[in-house]
Each structure stands twice: as structure tokens, then as C-alpha cells.
Image: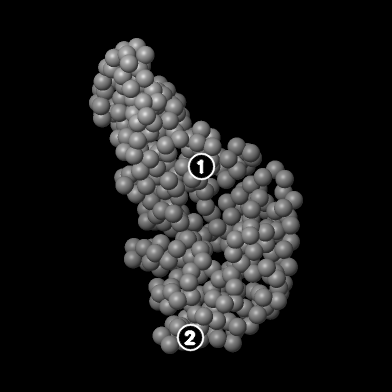
Amino acid sequence: MRDDQKLFAVVKANAYGHGMIEVAKTAKEAGANGFCVAIIDEGIELRNAGFDDLVLILGVCPAEQSNVIAANDLSVAVGDLDFLENAKPLLKAQGLKLKVHLAFDTGMGRIGFVNGEEVHEAEAFMKENSDQFEFEGIFTHFACADTKDDSYYKKQLEKFNELKDALDDLPPYVHVANSAASMWHDDCGGNAVRYGITMYGLNPSGRELELPCEIKPAFTLESELVSVRLLEPGTGIGYGKTYTVDEPQWIGTVPLGYADGWLRRMQGFKVLINGEYCQSVGRVCMDQFMVRLPYEMEKGTKVTLIGENGGKCITAQDVADYADTIHYEILCSVSERVPREFINKY
């Protein structure tokens, strides 16, 4: 990103599973100018934690809650004129002004204005009702900024500029770049960047594109052995008895399961214990899973599911590859009942 661009730290979904409030504090200390969330409650949580910076709700919000958004000094993404028309009487009745970022649908197919006439109508409506609305920003979201083929990215950028040109006046914030665009596309413009997955040290492209600079993952997922037993041949492990001990084996139990975000399809995945890869056996349970140990280990021995252990490493991308998904889903799936510990190593 350029030196003159603002940075909006994307902390939705509990900061991609990392812990929203602590991540927001760190991001602000590092120079973030604002934050992006997905729902109203996330924005209010930031306000209650003392953040007075710009907080933009990227998700669709009902017009009936526009007063709550405005009362908490939150900004909101708006993708159609109906929202503005329905929010106006509520805001007027309570003497509130709502900060609006118009969403342009340039090819994502989710939310947003799709033609210049609609954009111009929305701008005119906000100007006519300036006591109720503050036109604060415009934005779009790229679907393929993280792929080798950049033809669709270029098509979206062209569409964004076309919709932008329908405005009589630009608002204070024009934010086009997400993490991927900020990494691989210097030409997308705008005076602000929404920095998401890359802020957490992960490649938006997975394994498709190499990063232009080095980043370090911020996330480690660890547990411990709470049971270590030598089981006899014929002993079944887990629901459905999908694994049966065929010789005397040391089996350890890890107190983490699919209710914690360790997906059921992680059965058979190898975790790190004492620097050795140990395969999980049997089905992942709601609260626990079992591993085959190479030898007897003490209860309380650290188990690394994501991170470094004994000079070896398991990445979130490794887990995602095994689960046939993306690392975003792996991190966001880690539930709030898993305690977060925040350590500044840098």
C-alpha cells in the first residue's frame, strides 16, 4: 500500500478467530486508521471496548436498525436505495445522522449497486437528506485478486471506475483493495485499504501465488494430552469404532473437538507432540480426539495442531489442505470456548 493510504483492519468474525479486541488494540498501535466488521454487534463491541475510530459494518443491516448504528457512531455499507429511504424517517425522528459507504457490486454478486444511475440516485438522496446521512465512502470487493489469471480482476476494476464516475463528488474514503489486491495489484487505486487475512500472517491466495514479501503467521493452536494409556489389541477407538488397535499401542486423548472448531473431517490428521508427527485415530468427538503415540508420554505434554513444535511446523494451510477447505475457514471455526493467549514475540 502507498504511504498516503489509510489502513482499515478487518477484525470481523472475532478477528478471523484470533480475538477481536486484542487484535484491534495491536492493529491500532501499529497504525490502523479504522476497522471493518461484519455485523452490528461486532461494531458495538469495539465501541464498548473504548475504540473511537472509524468502524465500518460490511454486512447487510436492516434499515430498522439504522438508529442503533448511528447512535453508536458506526458506519454502514449500503447496497441499495431502499435502505436509505426506509432508514430516513427513523433517523429523522430521533435526530440521528448515519455514516454511509456505498457498496458497488462489480462482479462479486453479493451486495451493492450495479449501475451508475442507481449510484447517482443514492448520492442525490443523501445530499437532499444531509441531516440524516453522511456520505463517507465507496467500495467494492474483488473476487479474483488472488489468482494467476487477473482478467476478472481487471474487469471488476474497470466496472468500479465506471460506477465511481457516476458520482458528482467523491466521499472522503474510496477503498478498493483487500489483502490480495494490496499484495499483487498496485493499480487498483483508492485512498484506503481493507487489510484482512494478510494482517494475520497468511497468504490470501493459499498456495497459488507467492507473496511479494515475508509475513509470519500470528496464530498457534495448542492443547495437551489429558490421558495416556496402553491399549490392548482389539480395542476400538471413538464413535463407530473406525479404528481398532492391532497391537499394544499408546493412545493419548486431546481435549479438543469439533465443538472447539477442530473439524470432524480432521480424522487421521497428524499433530505434533514432542517434535513428532502423531496421527489422530478414530473419529473426532465433540470435545476430544485421540492420537496414536510412538511411546509413553506424560499427561500434560503439549500438543500442537497449528504452529511449531520441536523444530517442525504445521500451518493453517496444511490443515486446510487436509480438510479440503481454505485457511480462513479453519481459523474462523475455532470457537470462543478455546481460550486465547496473546503473546508479543516481535
Which residue appears at 70% of the width and 59% of the height? Answer: 157
- The amino acid on which the numbered mark 1 sits, given as a three-letter code, is His
Extreme residue in the top direction: 247
Extreme residue in the front direction: 240
Q: Quadrant of the N terminus?
A: bottom right
Q: How many marks?
A: 2
Q: Is residue 10 above or below residue 282?
A: below
Q: Is residue 343 left or right of residue 86?
A: left
Which residue appears at 51% of the width and 63% of the height? Answer: 59
Q: Residue 144, labelled with which disc? A: none
Q: Nearer the viewer, residue 234 or 346?
A: 234
Q: Is residue 108 left or right of residue 280?
A: right
Q: Nearer the viewer, residue 135 or 298?
A: 298
Q: Nearer the viewer, residue 116 or 234?
A: 234
How crowded pointer 2 is (Cα within 10 Å; few <14, some 14-19, many 20+) is rated as few
Q: Quadrant of the C terminus?
A: top left
Q: Residue 89, labelled with which disc? A: 2
Q: Secondary structure at mark 1?
A: helix
Residue 163 seen in render: yes
- The amino acid on which the numbered mark 2 sits, given as a three-letter code, is Pro
Q: Secondary structure at mark 2?
A: helix
Residue 118 image position (x, y, % from top left): 67, 75
Q: Quarter of the image holding residue 271?
A: top left
Q: Quarter of the image holding residue 310?
A: top left
Which residue appears at 26% of the width and 20% of the height? Answer: 229
Q: Residue 327, labelled with which disc? A: 1
Residue 24 image position (x, y, % from top left): 41, 56
Q: Nearer the viewer, residue 138 or 68?
A: 68
Along the polypeptide, which appears first: circle 1 or circle 2?
A: 2
Which residue appears at 65% of the width and 50% of the height? Answer: 145
How crowded pointer 1 is (Cα within 10 Å; few <14, some 14-19, many 20+) is rated as many
Q: Is residue 125 left or right of residue 294?
A: right
